[in-house]
């Protein structure tokens, strides 16, 4: 089975929870109450979209190729008492 690395953007929502999208797959966006949940949800959404592309015989959008290390940039909310 082939594996692909899809770029994903995860953001904290003002009202709580998280929003994630895969910008190269049109319409691929999800929400989740926790970071872990939104990551699981976006993985599922990407999988469903990729499978539907293949079933329909559609060409998948090109994925930018990365060389070397994969760098993840994230804002991590850290509650500090006091």
Image (spheres, rainbow, N blue to C red):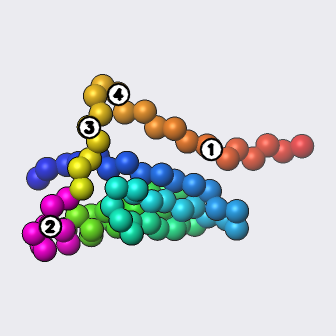
Q: Earlier in the sequence, mark 3 or mark 1?
A: 3
Closer to the observer: label 1 or label 2?
A: 2
Pointer 2 residue: 58
- The residue at 48%/59% (across/down) is 20
Pointer 1 residue: 76
Q: Is residue 21 magenta?
A: no
- Image quarter of residue 19: bottom right
Spatial CA distance of label 1 from label 2 is 37 Å
- The residue at 46%/37% (across/down) is 72
Is residue 81 shown above or below 54?
Answer: above
For the residue pair 27 and 37, the one nearer the viewer reads as 27
Pointer 3 residue: 65
Left-right relation of 42 to 78: left
Closer to the observer: label 3 or label 4?
A: 3
- The residue at 61%/64% (across/down) is 17
Give the magenta part as a residue range: 52-60
Q: Earlier in the sequence, mark 3 or mark 2?
A: 2
Checking the image for residue 10, the label placed there is none
Q: How would you rate the neighbour count of disc 4 (Cα within 10 Å): few for under 14, some for 14-19, many for 20 or more?
A: few
Pointer 4 residue: 69
Q: Earlier in the sequence, mark 1 or mark 2?
A: 2
Q: Is the Cβ of the residue at disc 3 closer than 8 Å to that at disc 2?
A: no
Left-right relation of 42 to 74: left
Spatial CA distance of label 2 from label 4 is 30 Å
Spatial CA distance of label 3 from label 1 is 26 Å
Where is residue 78 shown, x and y percent of the image? 70, 44
Can you see residue 40? no
Q: How would you rate the neighbour count of disc 1 (Cα within 10 Å): few for under 14, some for 14-19, many for 20 or more?
A: few
Where is residue 2 shown, x and y percent of the image? 14, 50
Q: Earlier in the sequence, mark 4 or mark 1?
A: 4
Where is residue 41 shown, x and y percent of the image? 41, 65
């Amino acid at each position: 089975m082939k594996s692909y690395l899809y770029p994903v953007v995860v953001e904290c929502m003002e009202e709580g929870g998280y929003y994630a999208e895969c910008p190269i797959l049109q319409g691929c966006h999800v929400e989740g109450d926790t970071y872990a949940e939104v990551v699981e949800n976006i993985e599922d959404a990407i999988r469903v979209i990729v499978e539907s592309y293949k079933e329909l015989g559609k060409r998948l959008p090109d994925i930018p190729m990365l060389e070397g290390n994969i760098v993840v940039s994230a804002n991590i909310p850290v509650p500090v008492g006091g």
